[in-house]
Amino acid sequence: MTLFVNALTQIDASLWCPTRGLVGASWHVDAELDGELGEDGMLFDFGEVKPWIKSRLDAGADHTLLVPTRAPGVSVQECSEGLCIRGSTPYPMEIRGPRQAFTLLPWNAIDAERLSTHFSAELMRRPPPRVNDIRLTLREETIDGAAYCYSHGLKRHAGNCQRIAHGHRSCLHIWKNGQRDAQLEMDWANWLADRYLVDEEDIVTDGDTETQGLLTSRYQAPQGRFFLRLPAARCAVLPSPTTVEHIATWLATEIARDSRQRIRVQAFEGINKGAIAEAGP
Ligand SMILES: Nc1nc2c(c(=O)[nH]1)N=C([C@H](O)[C@H](O)COP(=O)(O)OP(=O)(O)OP(=O)(O)O)CN2
């Protein structure tokens, strides 16, 4: 017998890609479980399947930086923060933080299919009674229109969003004077694509690296100390923390200033949630 639960949970993370650099990602997680029925006529109570799988993913790869340790130019070292991850291709990157902020995978590149197999095998290490196979499928949300991937960290978040390099794949909806504007959505999504959104308060001034065009961000959060260095050109600096409320407000303000029109922005944070903000010229 096979039991299935589609869109059981979501994973939001960032990954290091040898061609795109730091990429935010959001996936729906679908699950299939094979096994025998119990006396209650069930393989595994739906009410238990969902928290069982979600809690394991939440405690693992969710909200981490997925690091393909065999990708060209990637190195992993211990450091005073925990781990120091460096990359050189397609651009220089250094990210440090507590170990739990990273998922190290001995691969050349991260992809959803391989992750699905990997997470399924991890769950099968301690399967529930009567379950003899588990298959997870990570799939991107189908987005008809503008979308962008971004990474960030929220130092004031009590949970895993404090990790300096986690991210999302998000829709972007923009109204100009009350009308949805697909071109504006596409233009801004293209500009935001694969950027790191940083709170200007977290930027550290460092003359040497700044002259090389690098931006450094550093903060202390409940899980530990975090550090990130990326090319400034791959970042977008906000005058506030990068919560989705502030992202929506910042985008509305910037777009209203640019277009000199009344702007409404619905900014998503990953799948099916986000914030709405408006600004005038
Ligand atoms: N009001 C806000 N709440 C949260 C924000 C935010 O910007 N505004 N941001 C975060 C994190 O950045 C995070 O990445 C979102 O986390 P997510 O796991 O998606 O949040 P949930 O609590 O919905 O968790 P699920 O496990 O997916 O149910 C957090 N909160």
Image: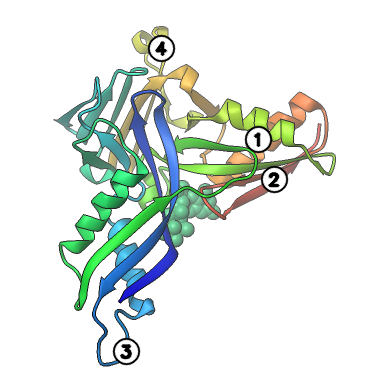
Label 4 CB-ligand 1 distance < 8 A: no
Q: Earlier in the sequence, mark 4 or mark 2?
A: 4
In contact (CB < 8 Å): disc 2 and disc 1: yes
Task: Indicate the secondary structure of the residue bearing disc 1.
Answer: helix
How far apart, in angstroms, are the residues tagged by discs 3 and 1?
Answer: 52 Å
Mark 1: which amino acid? Leu
Q: Residue at x 83, y 32 (%)?
A: 261
Q: Where does the N terminus fall, quadrant-wise?
A: bottom left
Q: Residue at x 39, y 22 (%)?
A: 230
Query: Mark 1 vs mark 4: which is more N-terminal?
Result: 4
Q: Quadrant of residue 108?
A: top left
Q: Which mark is residue 41?
A: 3
User: What amino acid does circle 4 point to?
Assistant: Glu
Mark 3 or mark 1, earlier in chain: 3
Give SS at disc 3.
Answer: loop
| Mark sitting earlier along the chain (2/1) | 1
Q: Amino acid at mark 3?
A: Gly
In the image, farthest residue toward the bottom: 39
Q: Name which quarter of the figure residue 41 lies in.
A: bottom left
Q: Residue at x 45, y 47 (%)?
A: 26
Circle 1: is it few (<14), some (14-19), or many (20+) Cα within 10 Å?
A: many
Which mark is in front, 4 or 2?
A: 2
> Between 71 and 32, which is closer to the camera in this rendering?
32
For the C terminus, the quadrant is: top right
Disc 2 versus disc 1: distance between alpha carbons? 8 Å
Q: Would you name the residue on which mark 4 appears?
A: 210
The disc at residue 251 is: 1
Residue 20 visible: yes
